[in-house]
Amino acid sequence: MNSNQNNDTFPDKTYIDKNLQKRPSKSLFGLIIGDLFGHQKISLLLLVMIIISAGAVLITTQQVRKQLFEREQLLLEHDVLESEWRNLVIEENVLADPKRIEEKAKNRLGMSYVTPQNETVIVIKSK
């Protein structure tokens, strides 16, 4: 009885009709692509938008870095040119009126030219 019950509830699995089994006509990759274009258009669109935005972020970051480097180079060049400009202005003022500069040095700082009368020589002998 036990063997009859098995045969009634579970038919013999050794015989399988090959006509009933369906083989996919496409490969797995083809099925995935077909599903994406057929049923998942929004997901595919979102994926494309994510890739485009990631590329835009990369390009923007590269441009910002390039511009920051150029800005730093321009600031360094600006500092050098400003220093040269100050030196030229000082030189121009000294050449334009050297007596005025000499009077300011004497009055404000107590500076004067060295003459043989007010010159002191210190000699240091080494061993």
Image (tube, helix red, strand yellow):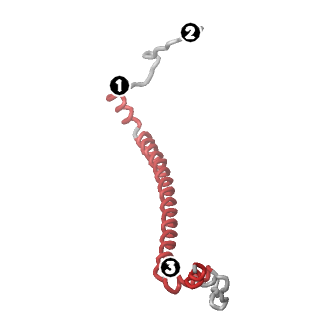
SS for callout 3? helix
Callout 3 amino acid: Leu
Residue highlighted by disc 1: 110
- Relative to 119, say whether 107 is above or below: below
Q: Residues within 10 Å of mark 3 (few under 14, many from 20)?
A: some
User: Is 101 in front, or is 82?
Assistant: 82
Residue at 45%, 42% in the rendered image: 91
Q: Residue furthest front?
A: 1
Q: With 104 as the anchor, is 87 left or right in this view? A: right
Estimate the spatial distance between the alpha carbons at disc 1 and disc 2, rounded to whole Å: 31 Å
User: Is 113 in front, or is 73?
Assistant: 73
Residue at 42%, 39% in the rendered image: 94
Q: Position of residue 95 (x, y in %)?
A: 44, 41
**Picture quarter containing residue 89?**
top left
Mark 1 and mark 3 lie on one chain; the one further toward the N terminus is 3
Res. 44 mark: 3
Res. 8 mark: none
Callout 1 amino acid: Gly
Residue highlighted by disc 2: 125
Q: Residue furthest left?
A: 107
Q: With 1 as the anchor, is 76 left or right in this view? A: left
Residue at 50%, 13% in the rendered image: 122
Q: Quadrant of the C terminus?
A: top right
User: Is 41 in front, or is 14?
Assistant: 14
Residue at 42%, 16% in the rendered image: 118
Q: Position of residue 33 (x, y in %)?
A: 57, 82
**Picture quarter containing residue 125?**
top right
**Tag 1 and tag 3, C-beta contact below 8 Å:** no
- Relative to 82, say whether 97 is above or below: above
Choose mark 1 or mark 3, whichever is in front: 3
Callout 2 amino acid: Lys
Estimate the spatial distance between the alpha carbons at disc 1 and disc 3, rounded to whole Å: 85 Å
